[in-house]
Structures are given as C-alpha cells and as structure tokens.
Image (cartoon, rainbow, N blue to C red):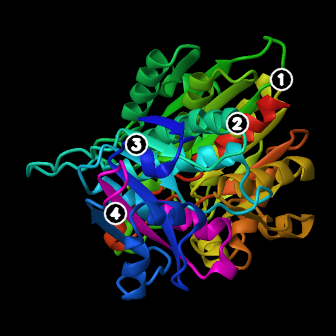
C-alpha cells in the first residue's frame, strides 16, 4: 500500500476516487466545495434533493461527474457539524475506506474536514489513515473451501489537508507498520485451537524472527521450562497432551546495556477452564485466549520493522488448559518460579498462573518497565464493557504512559484501583496465597495476584478480555491492543 499527501487542486487530481465529506445539515465540507464548483454545482443539487443525509457512517458513490479528473466521488457522512471531532472524523474515514475496499477502486484521495490540531495533528492524522486503511483491507484468514472473493484493489491512498507533509508521511510509515503488526495478531488469534497450539505459536514466532531482521527468538520446551521451576505454568499445562512452550523474543535497537521494556503475553491457545469447566455457550471463543501473546509477538515485529532505538523483550507463556486425567484440581498447590506457593481454587483462573512465572522470568533482563497483556478476566468485561481495556500497575508514571498511548492511538484503556486491600482476598490457609479471591472486584484481585510477583519492578497490567476480539456475526480478533503497545514503544523511542 502506498500513502501520500495530495497537494494540488482536488478537482484536477487524476485518480480513481475522491472522498468528500458532507455534514448532516446538508453542508459540504471545505474541500468538497471546491470540487462542487468544478462540477457546476452537481453535488449541491444532489444534497438539495435530499439524496444524501450526511449521517455518521453513510456513504454514497457517484460516477462520471463533469469538470474533475477523478472518475468517481465518494460522499461520506460527517454527522452534525457542531459535534464533529476526532471520533466523528475517524468514523467517517473508516466508513469511506470500508466502502472503497468493497469496490475495484485502486486509488483514492481522502479530503475530509479535520478536527483541530490538538485533537489530531499531522503525524497522528497520517497514522490513523494508514491504520484504518489496513483494517479496511484485512480479510479474515478463514478455512472455507469455497472460492474466495478477489482481494481489495485499493493500492494507493492520498490524504489531506496537512500542514506539515513530513510529519504526515512519518505517520503514514508508522501507521502502515502498526497495520501490518495487527494483521499478525489477528491472523494468529483467529486460528482454531487445533491448529494454533503452543508448539505452532512457537514456530510462528521463529518464522517471524527470521523474516524480521534484528529479532532474536528462543523457545523453551517442557524440560527447559521445568528447569526454570515454572511450577504454576506446568500445573496449567499438565492436563493437555499439547506440551507447553515459553517463547522469548529479543529486539536490540539501543546499546546492549540499556535496560529493555519487557512485554509479557498470556498465550492460552485454548481454555476450556480445566476441571473448573466453562459453560459450553461461547467456549469456542476461548481460542482467543492467546490474544495477549499474539499482541506481544506482533508488537516485537513492529519494533524490528521500524528499527526503534530501544531494547524490547517479549515473553510468551504458551499452554493449553484442558480437563484431562492429569489436569490440576481445585485445591492443588503449585510452587511458582519465584518459590511462592499458590493454592489453585479455580482452574479457570489459569492466566495469572502462567503469567506469574513469566513475570518472574522477566527479572533477569533488569527491565526498565514490564507490561503484561492478557485476556485475563470476564470481570473486566463486566466492569468496562468492550470499549476500554483494564489498566492497573504499581508504577503511576508507567500507568499514565500507557493510558496516554491509548488515547493517542484510539486504543483506549481505563485505570482501575490496585490498592493493598484487594490482595487480602487472596489469603489461603494452605499456601502463601490462593489464585482467586471471590467475585467482587475480580479483575482487580487478579491483578493483585500478579502484583505479588512484581515487587521491585516497574510493572503495569493490561486486561484486554473485552477488547481483543468480537463475538456474534463479526466474530474475530480486533487486533487490539497492538496500536496502544506500538504507540507506547514509538513514543518511548522518540524520547
């Protein structure tokens, strides 16, 4: 995909399609008025007839208008003018690109009104256009045997207006890299559990390491994991015939002695709940329980592709949680790699068990910051729905950094409290603590459990259970939180 800035008159652009905005009041946006004048007022007449309402998300494709170089014009609804801000612009751009992706249009020039610069500067304008284009062109990696429709024809996108073309071009470059990383996350997460096993995930990580220069990949097999004394991780995997894998991805873009950022991903390639078996409805979606792992792998490829000047380590604990005859039982006690003992009261609270050993492993890198990413709790979905990821941690500066990255990238998260009272719910009569603490504040007590393994680290936790995938007719991976993580690393590198 080629991205650029249009600079000369829109009406004279020889391109397949011009994308123009219309407000609900029937008012053409600024750039659209110049095109309307070149066509002899054709667009104005169309709006006066009431043929296009300009509602958010509405689109209308017009062909062969006189007086312009483009062969088509796509009108896109901007909604009410007084409410037009970044979110409305993003929705309009998204709708336009989705429409174009369903046609044989190969090139377009986007000329929608833009929010003020403090909401969307030239760099993030370029990033948003490239990321939205990537999302519009994505085709789910299904295994259907019927003939697949042709791939979208769109190959060239020009966008404007911009004040600083260099900043927008940098945004295009970074946005295209984020979009490519999201494809990796979505493709991995969409695969069924009988294909995407822990071993498969490890081999895919190795293949991506070979494809992206500067990305080193090491895989620990079950004997190596046992030597690391990851007793909690092994407790989760022991009920499955699929052996666990622990994947280490290392990208070095700064001096060797520069402390890295460590990203830790939950990689439960299928989660039945184990002996604490989940209800059958919706269990098929538990193939998405490795979305945190997929996001970590994808984000490491982005760091390598953009050659970010910082060191990044990705740790992926990959297991399958099954109710086999050897499965861990409620009441069993496991010893973590840190030496702390855990009473496993609920085998469906397995993500925190594999993450606690991965977080302990992170210590050997003497990290500048540690962020874990996990589809950890249904409680977080109850608390925040499907719009925000849950954000907690023991370092307010790191938490604020991630929150700001979510706002900038439109991949938002929301901070939940993580005070010492929540850890009280994890008390156990038989071990150092239990792996669950009851229903109340379930997303927070899960983070409190992880916090017992992160003392002395600058650590933050992202619970992405509500945002990493969709259910229903649109079932599939969303590619979140790769944009948030990407922005977090890009801005760290810039500093």
Q: Are marks 2 and 1 in contact (CB under 8 Å)?
A: no
* Badge 2 or badge 4: first in the primary sequence: 2
Q: Which of the two discs, 4 and 3, labels the residue nearer the N terminus?
A: 3
3 and 1 marks in contact (CB < 8 Å): no
Compare marks 3 and 1 and give the one earlier in the sequence: 3
Q: Residues within 10 Å of mark 1 (few under 14, many from 20)?
A: some
Q: Which percent across, then down, holds residue 147?
A: 8, 49
Residue 1 higher or lower than 343, as above or below: above
Of callouts 2 and 3, the N-terminal one: 2
Q: CA distance from mark 4 to mark 1?
A: 40 Å
Q: Nearer the viewer, mark 2 or mark 1?
A: 2
Reading the image, the residue beneath label 1 is 259
Residue 15: % across, % down: 36, 44
Q: Residues within 10 Å of mark 2 (few under 14, many from 20)?
A: some
Q: Which residue is mark 2?
A: 167
Q: Are the two marked residues, 4 and 1, in contact with CB atoms closer than 8 angstroms? A: no
Give me the C-alpha separation between circle 2 and circle 4: 43 Å
Residue at (40% x, 26% y) in the render: 203
User: What separation in Å lies between label 4 and label 3 (alpha carbons)?
Assistant: 15 Å
Which-is-in-front pick, marks 2 and 3?
Answer: 2
Element under label 2? helix
Query: For residue 284, which numbered disc appears in the image?
Result: 4
Residue drawn where x is 71% and y is 61% of the image: 413
From which residue to which does the magenta span run? 66-94
Q: Is residue 380 left or right of residue 63?
A: right
Residue 465 shows in the view: no
Q: Position of residue 367 (x, y in %)?
A: 81, 29
Kindly identify the residue that appears in the image at 40 percent across and 29 percent down: 204
The mark total stands at 4
For label 3, the residue is 188
């Amino acid at each position: 995909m080629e991205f650029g800035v249009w600079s000369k008159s829109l009406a004279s652009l020889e391109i397949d399609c011009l994308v123009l905005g219309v407000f609900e009041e029937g008012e053409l946006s600024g750039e659209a008025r110049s095109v309307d004048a070149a066509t002899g007022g054709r667009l104005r007449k169309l709006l006066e007839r009431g043929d296009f309402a300009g509602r958010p998300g509405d689109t209308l494709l017009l062909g062969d208008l006189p007086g312009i170089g483009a062969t088509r014009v796509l009108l896109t609804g901007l909604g009410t003018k007084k409410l037009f801000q970044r979110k409305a612009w993003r929705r309009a751009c998204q709708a336009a690109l989705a429409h174009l992706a369903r046609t044989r249009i190969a090139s377009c020039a986007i000329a929608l009104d833009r929010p003020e610069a403090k909401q969307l500067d030239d760099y993030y304008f370029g990033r948003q256009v490239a990321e939205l284009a990537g999302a519009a062109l994505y085709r789910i990696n299904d295994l259907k045997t019927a003939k697949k429709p042709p791939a979208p024809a769109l190959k060239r996108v020009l966008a404007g207006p911009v004040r600083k073309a260099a900043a927008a071009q940098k945004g295009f470059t970074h946005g295209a890299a984020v979009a490519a990383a999201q494809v990796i996350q979505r493709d991995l997460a969409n695969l069924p559990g009988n294909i995407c096993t822990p071993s498969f995930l490890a081999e895919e990580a190795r293949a991506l390491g070979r494809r992206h220069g500067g990305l080193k990949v090491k895989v620990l097999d079950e004997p190596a994991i046992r030597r690391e004394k990851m007793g909690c991780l092994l407790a989760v995997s022991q009920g499955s015939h699929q052996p666990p894998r622990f994947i280490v991805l290392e990208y070095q873009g700064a001096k060797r002695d520069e402390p890295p950022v460590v990203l830790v991903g939950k990689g439960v390639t299928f989660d039945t709940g184990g002996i604490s078996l989940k209800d059958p409805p919706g269990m098929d979606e538990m193939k998405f329980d490795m979305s945190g792992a997929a996001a970590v792998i994808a984000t490491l490829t982005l760091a390598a592709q953009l050659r970010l000047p910082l060191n990044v380590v990705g740790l992926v604990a990959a297991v399958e949680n099954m109710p086999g005859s050897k499965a861990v039982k409620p009441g069993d006690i496991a010893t973590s790699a840190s030496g702390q003992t855990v009473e496993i009261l609920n085998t469906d609270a397995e993500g925190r068990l594999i993450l606690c050993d991965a977080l302990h492993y992170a210590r050997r890198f003497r990290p500048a910051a540690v962020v874990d990413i996990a589809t950890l709790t249904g409680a977080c979905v109850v608390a925040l729905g499907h719009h925000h990821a849950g954000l907690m941690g023991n370092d307010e500066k790191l938490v604020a950094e991630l929150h700001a990255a979510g706002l900038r990238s439109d991949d938002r998260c929301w901070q939940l409290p993580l005070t010492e009272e929540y850890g009280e719910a994890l008390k156990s009569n038989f071990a150092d603590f239990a792996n669950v603490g009851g229903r109340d504040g379930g997303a927070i007590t899960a983070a409190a459990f992880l916090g017992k393994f992160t003392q002395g680290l600058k650590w933050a936790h992202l619970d992405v259970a509500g945002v990493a995938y969709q259910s229903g007719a649109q079932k599939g991976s969303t590619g979140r939180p790769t944009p948030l993580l990407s922005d977090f690393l890009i801005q760290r590198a810039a500093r």
